[in-house]
Image (cartoon, rainbow, N blue to C red):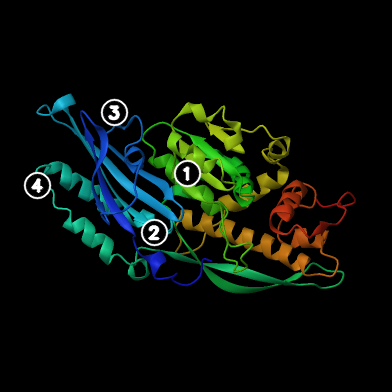
């Protein structure tokens, strides 16, 4: 639940690591904290395939159950070493993705400092950073005030809404969602629907992977909500960069968004619901294909999104607030319907949350099956809504 400051463990870092490229051994872990941390394979995420042609990159990725990492990669030309290249990646591990974006600058500086003095690397500052970091005390972690509604049925009228305020954390690098909106235009509403439905989404990219990782995190923000009900409070899981070694893991997942650089993922349709290549959406499911279509309601929502702004908020924060409050309205309305004797969603419910009884019916039925399988939907065929 995105309220309050979170638990003590959630606010902390759980580890750190340093990876270097060795001309004979390839990518290898040269230091880690704690020293007994199980980090097998992380050296290939910290230095994604193709990184050798890059000078700089930042990658986010899923490490294991409940553990996520962010690392900075840098390389420099050096004619005194084999292959004329020195490359290093420095990363930290956390029990969630909420504050990973706060470590980017520190990791970039630390990585550069270690490259500048390869024979005299002091890992103490990195270990101290892990031990001393506390997101609850970090002023760079932004929490947005968002409306969390409760609905009251009024016979013959639209349900009335009583608003309370809740907190939602900004958990991606600045401008990530604004960049995604600019990239996809009104198709951001397709990504919103896929994210709210917690579909398995894979972006195909090429190194550097930073932008694609932030696109994955922005997608997760599209599904954000601040409900406390355990059935509603988990948004889409942002796994960031994933590689071939992750196939056994994601093949058992039902809820994630990630980016990959290997084209071999594309024909493995059992791994995903939607594959995004060159900004085009691909799916083998007829049910999902219907969601991929832009409706007039999607266009109207995009216009509202484009004009959303609030004094004191960045464009990115305004966009996040727009989607979190929309999701809150929809999911609390479904919960209200589930608590009725009839368990029925009415046209008035749909209109009250800002959706269209016809254009958005396929989405709503899918949402009902995912979050409230007990609910039924009123016949919308006689709806004359514009």
Choose between 208 and 140: the one closer to the eye. 208
| Residue 181 numbered mark, or none | none
Task: Give the CA separation, mark 2 to mark 1.
Answer: 16 Å
Q: Earlier in the sequence, mark 4 or mark 1?
A: 4
Pointer 2 or 3: first along the chain: 3
Cα gap from disc 2 to disc 4, whole angstroms: 30 Å
Q: Nearer the viewer, residue 118 or 43?
A: 43
Q: Residue furthest front?
A: 36
Question: What whole-number distance in Å separates the C-alpha atoms at marks 2 and 3?
Answer: 29 Å
Residue situated furthest right in the rendering? 382
Q: Nearer the viewer, mark 2 or mark 4?
A: 4
Q: Is residue 39 left or right of residue 349?
A: left
Label 4 crowd bin: few (<14), some (14–19), many (20+), radius 10 Å: few
Mark 2 lies on residue: 99
Q: Quadrant of residue 51?
A: top left
Disc 2 element: loop
Residue in the picture at 82% in, 57% down: 376
Residue 356 lies, in percent from the top left, at 76, 52
What residue would you read off at disc 4? Answer: 120
In the rendered image, which quarter is residue 12 located in? Answer: bottom left
Residue 141 image offset from top left, x and y in percent: 38, 63
Mark 3 lies on residue: 53
Give the mark, 3 or 1, whose residue is nearer the N terminus. 3
**First of labels 2, 1 by sequence position:** 2
Q: Which mark is residue 215?
A: 1
Q: Position of residue 377 (x, y in %)?
A: 83, 56
Tell me how far mark 4 sits from mark 1, CA to CA: 37 Å
What's the residue at 19%, 45% (across, down)?
112
Q: Residue furthest top?
A: 83
Q: Would you say the residues marked 2 and 3 are in contact, meaning their CB atoms lie under 8 Å apart?
A: no
């Amino acid at each position: 639940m995105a309220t309050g400051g979170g638990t003590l463990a959630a606010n902390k870092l759980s580890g750190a690591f340093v990876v270097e490229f060795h001309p004979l051994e390839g990518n290898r872990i040269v230091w880690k904290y704690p020293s007994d941390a199980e980090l097998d394979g992380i050296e290939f995420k910290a230095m994604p395939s193709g990184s050798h042609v890059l000078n700089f990159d930042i990658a986010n990725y899923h490490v294991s159950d409940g553990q996520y990492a962010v690392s900075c990669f840098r390389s420099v030309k050096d004619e005194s070493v084999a292959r004329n290249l020195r490359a290093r990646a420095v990363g930290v591990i956390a029990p969630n993705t909420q504050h990973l974006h706060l470590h980017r600058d520190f990791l970039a500086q630390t990585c550069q400092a270690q490259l500048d003095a390869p024979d005299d690397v002091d890992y103490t500052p990195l270990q101290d950073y892990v031990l001393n970091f506390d997101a609850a005390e970090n002023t760079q972690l932004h929490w947005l005030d968002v409306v969390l509604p409760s609905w009251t049925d009024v016979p013959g009228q639209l349900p009335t809404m009583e608003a309370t305020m809740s907190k939602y954390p900004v958990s991606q690098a600045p401008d990530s969602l604004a960049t995604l909106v600019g990239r996809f235009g009104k198709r951001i509403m397709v990504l919103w629907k896929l994210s709210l439905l917690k579909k398995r989404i894979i972006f195909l990219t090429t190194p550097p992977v930073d932008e694609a990782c932030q696109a994955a995190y922005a997608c997760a923000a599209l599904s954000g909500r601040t409900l406390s009900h355990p059935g509603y409070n988990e948004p889409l899981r942002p796994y960031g960069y994933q590689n071939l070694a992750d196939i056994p893991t994601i093949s058992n997942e039902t809820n994630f968004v990630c980016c990959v650089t290997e084209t071999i993922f594309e024909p493995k349709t059992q791994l995903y619901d939607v594959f995004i290549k060159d900004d085009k959406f691909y799916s083998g499911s007829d049910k999902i294909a219907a969601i991929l279509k832009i409706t007039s309601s999607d266009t109207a929502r995009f216009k509202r999104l484009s004009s959303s702004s609030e004094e004191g908020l960045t464009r990115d924060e305004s966009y996040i607030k727009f989607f979190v409050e929309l999701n809150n309205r929809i999911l609390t309305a479904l919960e209200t319907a589930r608590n009725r004797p009839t368990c029925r969603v009415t046209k008035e419910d749909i209109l009250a949350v800002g959706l269209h009884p016809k254009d958005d019916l396929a989405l709503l039925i899918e949402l009902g099956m995912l979050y409230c399988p007990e609910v039924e939907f009123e016949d919308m065929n006689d709806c004359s809504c514009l």
